[in-house]
Amino acid sequence: MENEQRSSENQLQIISEMAARIAELETLVKYYEEQFRLAQRRQFGASSEKSAASGQLGMFDEAENTSDSGIPEPELTQIVYKRRKQKGKRADDLSGLPVEVVRHDLPEWERICPDCGGPLHEIGHNARQELEIVPAQVKVIKHEQGVYACRACEKDGTRVPIMKAAMPEPVIKGSLASPSAVAHIMTQKYVMCSPLYRQEQDWKRQGVALSRQTMANWVIRCTEDWLGPLYERMKKRLLTREVLHADETVVQVLREPGKTAQSKSAMWVYRTSGDTQRQIVLFEYQPSRKAEHPRDFLSGFKGYLHTDGYAGYHTLNAITVVGCWVHMRRKFESVIKSAPTSPDSSAQEAIRRIGALFHLERQWEKLKPEDRYRKRLKESKPLAEAFFTWLETLRIIPKSATGVAIRYALDQRPWLMNFYIDGRTELSNNRAENAVRPFTVGRKNWLFCNTVKGARASAIVYSVIETAKANGLKPFEYLEFLFETIPNTTTERLDDLLPWGSVVPDQCRMPVKEERA
């Protein structure tokens, strides 16, 4: 009898252990299914956050994807009598372009009435508009400097004074490089994402043998000589702000001392916040993603820093890190993507609660920071605290996608709630992500940097271009202006050449569209 009881207990214990093992295996299967679906989504699925820059990845089928025969052609309105006319958006888009009128008239000998033979006179005209493209033209500019001497001194004097006409300094001495050529190369590479080897082919088609090595030398030399000092002035101004954004992405440098060609380095980006009138976007190349790099770059900065969840930012001294609610929300979005047939209700509820905070922020977008701060404390902060309290009540398997999202949100809570300290802070770090996106899109085309010197030059060029764009300037025109001006000015005047400087000509600025009444 005792043996039977022991046997029964052993069987129950075996069954219990098997049941626990089965539950554990089911949890693992569910976890691996989630990871598999997420991997498939990342590889083949469409991004849920689209941007204008992402269109470059579909350049080959762009015409098929974007064509729409139902959209009317843009029109240019020419008014020959005085009356108020409401122009449409397309007319506004073309209003800044020069217009060339081509007349098509009947010759004199054809201006005869076919019925009576009398002379014809013009009673009106039909008109149509077309956009005409003038291809880029490459030409050689030969600078000849007049040299003058005194004939009387040549004849009678012991010394002959020589006078030379004023001539601007070249952007690179002893080189064919011109301000427009260097600006064009930089714009093509860093704005249009065209690698130097493609530009080399394009120059060859125009009859110019300009190697990619020469273009790389021009870019690095002009960056070090002329854009570097401008970069340092922008950095000095950046660190005086009280609210900044930061982000980082990987970059591969083939020839980096002490590292293999396959190793990854980092490109960091720092930028001003939305409350700043004069926007600054700065890139910095570093060989790693260690926290010491933002600590060194931000030395002297004391204020609020918007970041993602990277723990390296949390060790910065005298800086209040503000977490990104968008990064946290993506964790719950991944839960839904990992189980599209039966999405987790907890993840859906989390996204709904977070969405309520963003809805309030959109309503307060135009308020002054102090008014926005009071609104947040009264209406938004209670919702955020209730969100975290609700997360703590959930009982989810820790290793599941939902469990990972909940743990991430709770771990990031101290930095996410720093959003409520100041009315100038933002719910997301999207400003930094948008700033780094042109670099990541360009990286898909040029893939890597060849040298550390080239990576640092790229960081400076990206900084100047993205800062120019953020302040409403046209990159090519602004770069050309800089390369024409900086070699012929003093360092004391560099502040006037910054994107908001007083001497930046109007042709560098994007046209300002008039608001409709």
Image (cartoon, rainbow, N blue to C red):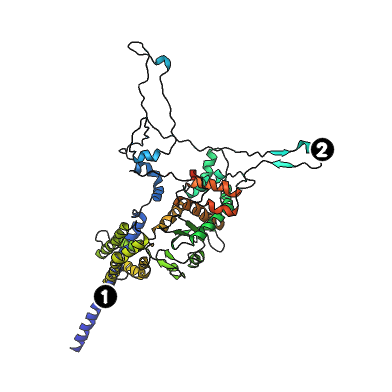
Q: Nearer the viewer, residue 344 or 134?
A: 134
Q: Nearer the viewer, mark 2 or mark 1?
A: 2
Q: Between residue 158 and residue 485, name the one nearer to us.
A: 158
- Near mark 2 (Cα within 10 A), the count class, few <14, some 14-19 or many ≥20, is few
Classify mark 2: helix, strand or loop. Answer: helix
Q: Residue at x 37, y 18 (%)?
A: 121
Quadrant assignment for the C terminus: top left
Find residue 156 and name its label.
2
- Residue identified by numbered label 1: 20
Residue 479, numbered circle: none
Q: Amino acid at mark 2?
A: Asp
Does dot 1 land on a helix, a strand or a loop? helix
Specify whether 106 is left or right of 15. right
Disc with the residue nearer the chain's start (2 vs 1): 1
Q: Is residue 29 left or right of residue 278?
A: left
Q: Is residue 289 visible?
A: yes
Tell me, yes or no, if residue 264 can be seen here.
Answer: no
* Residue 397: quadrant of the picture: bottom left
Q: Position of residue 399 (x, y in %)?
A: 32, 69
Q: Find the residue positioned furthest to the front.
A: 82
148 displayed left or right of 82: right
Residue 439 image point, x, y percent: 46, 54
Above or below — where is 356 with respect to 10? above
Real-space Cα separation, disc 2 to disc 1, in angstroms: 114 Å
Where does residue 221 sit, x and y in percent of width and height? 59, 51
The residue most toward the top is 116
In depth, the one of 108 and 412 nearer the eye is: 108
Tell me what residue is drawn at x 56 percent, y 64 percent. Answer: 258
Where is residue 4 drawn, in percent x and y?
A: 19, 85
Q: Residue furthest bottom?
A: 2
